[in-house]
Image (cartoon, rainbow, N blue to C red):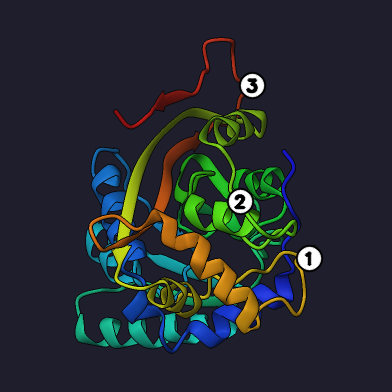
């Protein structure tokens, strides 16, 4: 599974900077979080130790604590300023909930090098963060190692149709990569099986956000930290002339006085089972109708 390489230092810097503005701009991210909880309610699990992998500002924490009352809830993110936001939000919530005995930990680390013990986690939750890893198989392998037997991995991530309008607009006049690549749902499912997970189930939803101006689109992307962090990106190509060309090309998508920004969100879950998978272990895909 190959994709353009992400410059992690640049991505970290973007998310650190966006930690101040993320909450206001992350409309889709909050909606997807709610959708993940709806899917989670269908699964029978009572986890004592939960890892929020790529936690961002920690928006999932209050509901994870209220739903499961885990003994331990671990927040992990590679952007220190985002992690501090998560700590502040969830420490405040924790103090208001005197009946909640959950112990909380906040770890600044890359999901491609998770510093947790083997077989130590009951459930791993990851909302729209996997797209920022370079080696998905490596991440899945690590997740499989730190999950306990019958542990659950539940996640969402962006699929390849995400921001297709922006990608096509850029390609109309530039040969360089300016938008991060996203992995197809079927490839994600195959990777889960290849890394030893059992009974993977994946589905996809398509969302379209609409904006009055192109500047509004770029504003939202900037303020959720979604900047171009590709190592092969063109440098010095964000001047007025470049942005004018980009806006002019993007305007061809305007409909009913609005500009669309499309997102393909892949939802999935799978189980850690400490035994070889037999031939009946297949991925279940539920594409959007």
Rendering quarter of residue 2: top right
Give above or below for 181 relative to 184. below
Q: Which residue has dot 1 on it?
A: 231
At x 26% / y 57%, what residue is drawn? 34
Residue 108 in view (yes/no): no
At x 58% / y 69%, what residue is drawn? 245
Query: Closer to the N terminus: mark 2 or mark 1?
Result: 2
Specify whether 289 is left or right of 203.
left
User: For numbered disc 2, what is the local secondary structure?
Assistant: helix
- Residue 262 position, x and y percent, is 40, 52
In the picture, the disc for residue 276 is 3
Residue 220 in view (yes/no): yes
Q: Which residue has dot 2 on it?
A: 146
Give above or below for 236 relative to 270. below
Query: Which quadrant is the N terminus positioned in?
Result: top right
User: For numbered disc 1, what is the local secondary structure?
Assistant: loop
Marks 3 and 2, how far apart at CA: 17 Å
Marks 2 and 1, how far apart at CA: 30 Å
């Amino acid at each position: 599974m190959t994709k353009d390489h992400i410059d992690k230092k640049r991505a970290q810097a973007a998310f650190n900077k966006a930690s101040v503005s993320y909450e206001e701009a992350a409309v889709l991210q909050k909606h997807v979080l709610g959708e993940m909880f709806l899917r989670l309610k269908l699964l029978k699990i009572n986890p004592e130790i939960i890892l929020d992998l790529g936690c961002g500002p920690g928006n999932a924490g209050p509901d994870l604590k209220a739903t499961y009352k885990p003994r331990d809830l671990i927040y992990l993110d590679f952007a220190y300023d985002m992690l501090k936001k998560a700590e502040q939000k969830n420490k405040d919530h924790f103090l208001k909930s005197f009946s909640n005995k959950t112990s909380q930990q906040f770890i600044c680390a890359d999901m491609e090098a998770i510093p947790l013990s083997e077989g130590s986690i009951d459930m791993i939750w990851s909302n729209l963060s996997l797209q920022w890893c370079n080696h998905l198989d490596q991440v899945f392998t690590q997740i499989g190692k730190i999950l306990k037997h019958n542990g659950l991995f539940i996640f969402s991530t962006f699929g390849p149709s995400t921001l297709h309008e922006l990608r096509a607009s850029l390609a109309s006049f530039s040969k360089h990569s300016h938008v991060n690549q996203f992995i197809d749902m079927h490839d994600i499912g195959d990777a889960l099986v290849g890394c030893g997970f059992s009974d993977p189930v994946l589905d996809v939803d398509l969302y379209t956000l609409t904006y009055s101006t192109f500047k509004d689109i770029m504003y939202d992307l900037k303020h959720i930290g979604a900047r171009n962090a590709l190592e092969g990106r063109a440098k010095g190509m964000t001047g007025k002339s470049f942005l004018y060309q980009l806006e002019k090309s993007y305007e061809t998508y305007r409909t009913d006085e609005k500009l669309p920004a499309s997102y393909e969100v892949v939802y999935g879950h799978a189980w850690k089972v400490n035994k070889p998978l037999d031939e009946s272990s297949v991925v279940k895909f539920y594409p959007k109708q």
